[in-house]
Image (spheres, grey):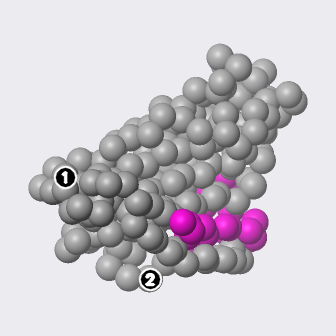
């Protein structure tokens, strides 16, 4: 069974002159001093490379996600051209919050006929606060699609924006690049009404 560890977020004014004077464009900007991190620990939920986080709340129902477009995040390994990943995700602006979930992933392998079973897929959803979700250390690199349901939500603060970024740590010989270099490009989430 997966375990969660949560660290609460504390914020403080960013200290810029425009924030102190209440400039209209930057009056809501705050600096994140602590981040909420949820860490998944490998358990019995990973089946054939698929993982579903157990959650409660409005975002846990398929009705909540009905009709919400599915986007694809493309990830490229920093050094190894053969290693690529795709992650399908959905997001929804709803009642002052932005709800986000990943749904599926697809990872290539090298050599292409080799299956690796210990890749990691993590994401950060951030606005004024940040939530990070880490997959179990059991994602499969076999050039097939697998389920990956991980959820997060943050407050929506107009003027700051909401962003997501994915990190893939590919399994295999000499494929590691470390925490900083395994993140992709951040994507700004836009309210599609």
Residue that numbered label 2 is attached to: 56
Q: Looking at the image, is mark 2 or mark 1 earlier in the sequence? A: 1
On the image, the x and y values in percent for residue 59 come to 35, 73
* Residue ranking furthest to the bottom: 56
Residue 126 placement (x, y as % from top left): 43, 57
Circle 1 Cα neighbour tier, 10 Å, few/some/many (<14 / 14–19 / ≥20): few
Does the magenta run of residues contain 48? yes
In the rendered image, the quadrant that contains the N terminus is bottom right
Which one is in front in this view, the residue at disc 2 or the one at disc 1? 1
For the point 71% across and 28% down, which residue is it?
109
Examine the rendering and report whether any part of residue 58 can be seen: yes
Residue closest to the eye, 80 or 64 = 80
In the depicted view, which residue is nearer to us: 115 or 95?
A: 95
Is the magenta region chiefly helix, strand or loop? Answer: loop
Q: Give how far apart the Cα atoms at labels 2 and 1 are.
A: 35 Å
Q: Image height check: is 149 above or below 88?
A: below
> Which of the image's four quarters has the C terminus?
bottom left
Check residue 87 for magenta coloring. no
Q: Which residues are magenta?
A: 33-54
Q: Is residue 100 left or right of residue 93?
A: right
Residue beneath the point at 50% across and 75% down? 10
Quick one: 48 or 81, which is closer to the camera? 81
Secondary structure of the residue carrying numbered label 1? helix
Mark on residue 110?
none
Q: Residue at x 63, y 58 (%)?
A: 134
Indicate left or right for 26 with 138 as reference: left
| Position in image of residue 6 (x %, y %) | 61, 77
Dot 2 falls on a residue whose secondary structure is loop
**Residue linked to disc 1:** 25
């Amino acid at each position: 069974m997966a375990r969660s560890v949560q660290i609460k977020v504390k914020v403080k004014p960013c200290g810029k002159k425009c924030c102190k004077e209440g400039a209209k464009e930057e009056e809501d900007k705050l600096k994140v001093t602590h981040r909420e991190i949820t860490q998944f620990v490998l358990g019995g939920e990973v089946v054939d490379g698929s993982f579903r986080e157990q959650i409660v709340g409005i975002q846990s129902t398929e009705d909540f996600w009905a009709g919400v477009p599915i986007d694809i995040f493309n990830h490229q390994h920093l050094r190894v051209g053969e290693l690529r990943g795709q992650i399908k995700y959905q997001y929804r602006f709803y009642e002052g919050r932005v709800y986000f979930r990943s749904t599926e992933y697809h990872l290539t392998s090298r050599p292409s006929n080799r299956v690796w079973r210990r890749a990691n897929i993590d994401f950060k959803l951030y606005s004024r606060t940040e939530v990070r979700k880490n997959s179990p250390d059991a994602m499969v690199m076999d050039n097939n699609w697998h389920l990956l349901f991980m959820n997060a939500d943050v407050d929506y603060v107009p003027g700051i924006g909401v962003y997501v970024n994915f990190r893939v740590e590919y399994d295999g010989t000499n494929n590691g690049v470390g925490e900083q270099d395994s993140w992709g490009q951040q994507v700004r989430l836009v309210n599609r009404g």
